Image: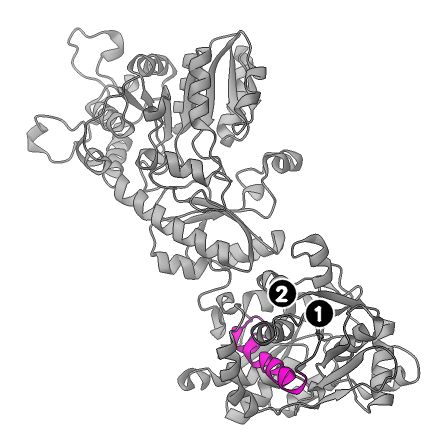
Amino acid sequence: MKMKKTGRSPSTDAVHAGQQEPRPEGAIVTPIYQTANYLLRGEDYHDIGYIRLSTTPNHRVLGKRIAALEGTEAALVLASGMAAISGSLLTVLSSGDHVLVQDTLYGGTASFLQQDLPRFRIEHSVIDPQDPSSWAAQLRPTTRAMYVETLTNPLVQVADLEAVVAFAREHGLVTLIDNTFASPVNFRPAEIGFDLVLESCTKYMNGHSDIVAGSVAGRADLVRRVKVLHDHLGGSLDPHAAFLLERGLKTLSVRVRQQNASAGRLAVLLEAHPAVSVVHYPGLESHAHHARATRLFDGFGGMMSFELAGGVDAAEAFIAALTIPTVAASLGGPESLVVRPAAAIHAGMSAEERAKAGIRDALIRFSTGLEGTDDLAADLNPGAGEPAAGGRGFDRVKPPGLPDIEAARERVYAAAFRSPLVRLGVDEGPEIWLKLENLQPIGSFKIRGSANAIGLIPPEELAAGVWTASAGNMAQGVAWNARRLGVPCSVVVPETAPRLKLDAIARLGATAVKTSVASWFEVFRTQRFEGMRGRFVHAFMDRDVMAGNGTIALELIEDLPDVNAVIVPFGGGGLACGIAAGLRALAPDVPVFASEVTGQAPFAESLRAGRAVSIPYTPSFVDGIGGPHVEPTMWKLAEDLLAGSAEVSLGDTARAIRLLATRNRVVAEGAGASSVAAALSGAVRGDKLVCIVSGGNLAPSSLATILEGGAP
């Protein structure tokens, strides 16, 4: 079927197609014809000038303009997208008829098919739009039409649209397509043979989030039939809304192209982000239907969806932290909108139905608006931008390069020293070497990362002070370096923090603020806490902190170049990932393993699940590692850099503490001893193993209990 075309670009048609000639009273803009009825001139009933019959000048201008944009013979504007959808289906279907529909549809359409059409004895069958070979089995003698969407909601999948048209022609079916997510700027379905093209003009067509409207475009005879039906149903658009829609159409091309460009860039950034597990956007090569979308579309649209590695909790925290997008349904307006479909637009579906449709509970849908792309990129980058109280964003969570680590040495050695590497005093098994970070001035490796991160803060910003969240060791590292540089320091600590570490924080001149364990863990996500001032120094989610920790890798390779493997206690992941990043550059064949305590091993559990998961968490004397989850932002980084996790029991860790104390006269806290316990267990293979003894801040009473054969 040959469709009517103006021969002009969509940008020109969006402004001029269908305009009144001659212009009434010379008006450049179509006036609002706010009159219900018009003089009779002997017209057919359905052509009488009357708002309910959609025959006002405002309606006629819009009909011609939308037909030009869609490349169709005719078009009709209606009161809503659902008016266009329901009216079109009722036009081509009669009592006893049957329609084939794709398996994922807009919720309003699905409800209409499931709840309303059966009352008219109209039935439907669901087809897989990606499998044309399965469609014939769904045909009935009463099948009259096929109904699909250009891009599905919310996974933005692309059906085999060319096959839909071919199949429908072969079997004499009318084809209907909801083109809302694409708009005629990106795709004109009539050009490949669709009979009726439906748009929710509420979205991209109007583009200002201030009206509800719909349109039907296609073959003139079909559009006429839809109009006649709606003349009886009353789904007409008010002239003032029609005026606003015409105004919105004038900027359709420039708006959609900007949204295409912004969404494309954001999708690429999100896909590369370590906190993001998957991005659904047809403009990405990773999208299952990218090749088809590239062939059919002129642009990929402003809609995308994605998941964070941390699941629902991470999704909710991410949405809550956004400052630009609005949490709302709909799409296509100047404002970026964000929503979690399972909790909102698809909440009416059962969990089983959502799972079957691929709509996971943690899925986030994002409609790109017209805000600055750089601003959106900073806001959407999970945790990026500048959080309250001087926090730095999660965009900092990238593995430091060798130049970063080498440059950190000067800042690190201004506060710390090169820790010794000594051999564990055991006669059997592999050589086990101990990197004694417990001998640092604060009794922990944390002095390294904090020295580097704080040393890089501009002086004018550093004057306001620094703060952190820590159970003790990072607090001491930040406090030590803050005192060394003469700036104030505050620390948010969990209510379970041991007295030994709290006393050390106080001695270093920092202010400790206690909070619940749950609230304390939340600080790592949000980088916010009431009353905190100055720059937030994250214990592990900071590239500068990891670069400082990575200086350990430089020392290891210089002191023991033939090391086979390195075992690092895994708390937040900043130590393990910093060392692993350095070794990847210096000695890529040397694997780095995390050490964790069974029952407090979120990284090991996440590795087993293939994604970041949460676990039940019970605090123990091994207080420097473990927790309820791996921070989603660290998950992908750790998964990529680390060779695995070696789990040990609390008893194994206590025995390692006793062994270190009796054989090497080394006092190690539970976290620091876990790496030694892992080496002794045989979980990590190699002739020469290095264990990072990350800290030695163990309460004397706990040490005494362990040396006597017990466990605190």
Say which amino acid is labelled 1: Ala
* The N terminus - image quarter: top left
Task: State which quadrant residue 298 falls in.
Answer: top left
* The C terminus - image quarter: bottom right
User: Spatial distance from mark 1 to mark 2, Cα to Cα?
Assistant: 9 Å
Q: Which residue is mark 2?
A: 638
CB within 8 Å, label 1 to label 2? yes
Residue 417 in picture, x, y percent from top left? 62, 92
**SS majority, magenta:** helix
Q: Give left or right: position of 128 versus 696.
A: left
Q: Nearer the viewer, residue 214 or 367?
A: 367
Q: Give left or right: position of 48 versus 283.
A: left
Magenta span of residues = 537-560
Q: Nearer the viewer, residue 345 or 175?
A: 175
- Residue at position x 37%, y 13% from top? 229
- Residue at position x 82%, y 88% from top? 700
The furthest residue to the front = 562
The local secondary structure at tag 1 comes to strand
Q: Give left or right: position of 687 versus 24.
A: right
Task: State which quadrant residue 223 falls in.
Answer: top left
- Residue at position x 49%, y 83% from top? 407
Residue 391 in picture, x, y percent from top left? 50, 72
Q: Which residue is mark 1?
A: 594
Say which amino acid is labelled 2: Ala
Dot placed on the residue nearer the N-terminal end, 1 or 2: 1
State the mark number for residue 264.
none
Q: Is-magenta flag for residue 562?
A: no
The local secondary structure at tag 2 comes to helix
Eyeballing the image, is 213 above or below 512?
above
For label 2, the crowd category at 10 Å Cα-Cα, with few meaning under 14, some 14 to 19 and many 20 or more, is many
